[in-house]
Amino acid sequence: MVAVDAALGPLAPGETIHIAHDGLSVEIAPAAGGRIAQITRDDLEWLVGYSAANPASIDWGSFPMLPWAGRIRRGSFDFDGNRYQLSPNLGAHAIHGIAFGLPWHVDTHSPSHVELSLQLPEGEHWPFGGIARQRIAIARDTLRLALSVTAQARAMPVVIGWHPWLRKPDRMGFAPSQCYPRDAEGIATLPLVKPPPRPWDDCFINRRPVIVQRGGQTLRLRSDCTHWVMYDEPEDATCIEPQSGPPDAFNLEPSVLAPGATRAAWYLWEWL
C-alpha cells in the first residue's frame, strides 16, 4: 500500500453510524474523513477495513477525494494569476485532497441514508475554502453515493471523486477507451494513449460499468464521472476510483468553479 506522510494525521474510525436494508449494511465513520468504514452484503465484507497496524488515512475504507483527486505534482499549481503551494503528503506531492483527513458533520441520519457536510478550512492545506456535501443511501442491493463541492466567495479549482479500497476481486470486467500515461514521477500526463496491460496505477477514460466478482457475488459499478483511476498493484486490494478529472488536474486540465457554483457527481454500486 502507499505510504503517506502524516500531514493531517492518521484517523481511526472513532464513533460510527450505520444504515442497512435487507442483507446490505454500510458503516460510516464521520470523524475519519466522512468515509465508509465497511460495506457488507449477505455477511461478505467488501472493503479493506481500518487496522491499527496500518493506520494511514488513505489506506482503508472508502473516502471522498476533494477538492482534488490523485496527485498534484509537488503540490504546486497556478490559478487566477497566482502560484499556490499545497502541503505535501506523499513525498514531494499532495494527494487526494484534504477531506479524507477531516471530521465531517452528520446533517441527517435515517435507517437508509446519511447526509454529511464539511466546511473546507482556508489555510496551509487549502487556500480557497468551500463547502463539501455527501449523501450515502441504500435500497435493496443498491448503494448510491453523491458528492459535491460548492465554492464560496472565491473561485476555486476543483476535482472530486471516491477512493474505495475493495478487497481483492476474484474477477473484474473493465474496458476503458484511453489512458493518461505516467511519467518518471508517476504523475499523469498527456496525450492520451491506449490502455496498458495490468497491473495498473493509472487514470483511464471509461464510460462503461465496471463489473467486480468476489465470494460468489457480482457487483456493478457506475458513475457519471468519465475519469476512473484503477489501482490494482496490491495483493489484497483493488481501488476503483471514479473522479471528475484526472490526477494533477490543476496543472493538466484545470477546471474552475465560479463563486457560489457547485460541482457534483454520483457513484452507484449495484449487486446483481
Image: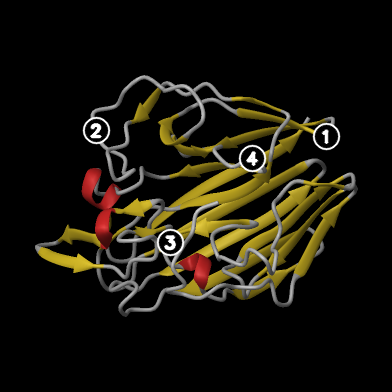
Q: Secondary structure at mark 2?
A: loop
Marks 4 & 2, CB-CB < 8 Å contact? no
Neighbours of disc 2 within 10 Å: few (<14), some (14-19), many (20+)? few
Q: CA distance from mark 2 to mark 3?
A: 26 Å
Q: CA distance from mark 1 to mark 2?
A: 38 Å
Q: Secondary structure at mark 4?
A: loop
Residue for point 62% across, 67% down: 55
Q: Is residue 73 above or below residue 201?
A: below
Residue for point 53% across, 58% down: 64
For marks 4 and 1, the one nearer the N-term is 1
Locate residue 78, reporting x and y percent. Answer: 16, 59
For marks 4 and 3, the one nearer the N-term is 3
Q: CA distance from mark 3 to mark 1?
A: 35 Å
Q: Is residue 168 left or right of residue 92?
A: right
For marks 1 and 2, the one nearer the N-term is 2
- Looking at the rendered structure, the number of numbered marks drawn on it comes to 4
Q: Is residue 122 left or right of residue 254?
A: right
For marks 2 and 3, the one nearer the N-term is 3
**Quarter of the image holding residue 223?**
top right
Image quarter (top left, top right, bottom left or bottom right) of the C terminus? top right
Query: Mark on residue 235?
Result: 4
Residue at numbered disc 1: 215
Q: Amino acid at mark 4?
A: Glu
**Quarter of the image holding residue 93?**
bottom left
Locate residue 91, reporting x and y percent. Answer: 35, 61
Q: Amino acid at mark 2?
A: Leu
Q: Secondary structure at mark 3?
A: strand
Labels 4, 3: front one: 4
Neighbours of disc 3 within 10 Å: few (<14), some (14-19), many (20+)? many
Q: Amino acid at mark 1?
A: Gly
Residue at numbered disc 3: 149
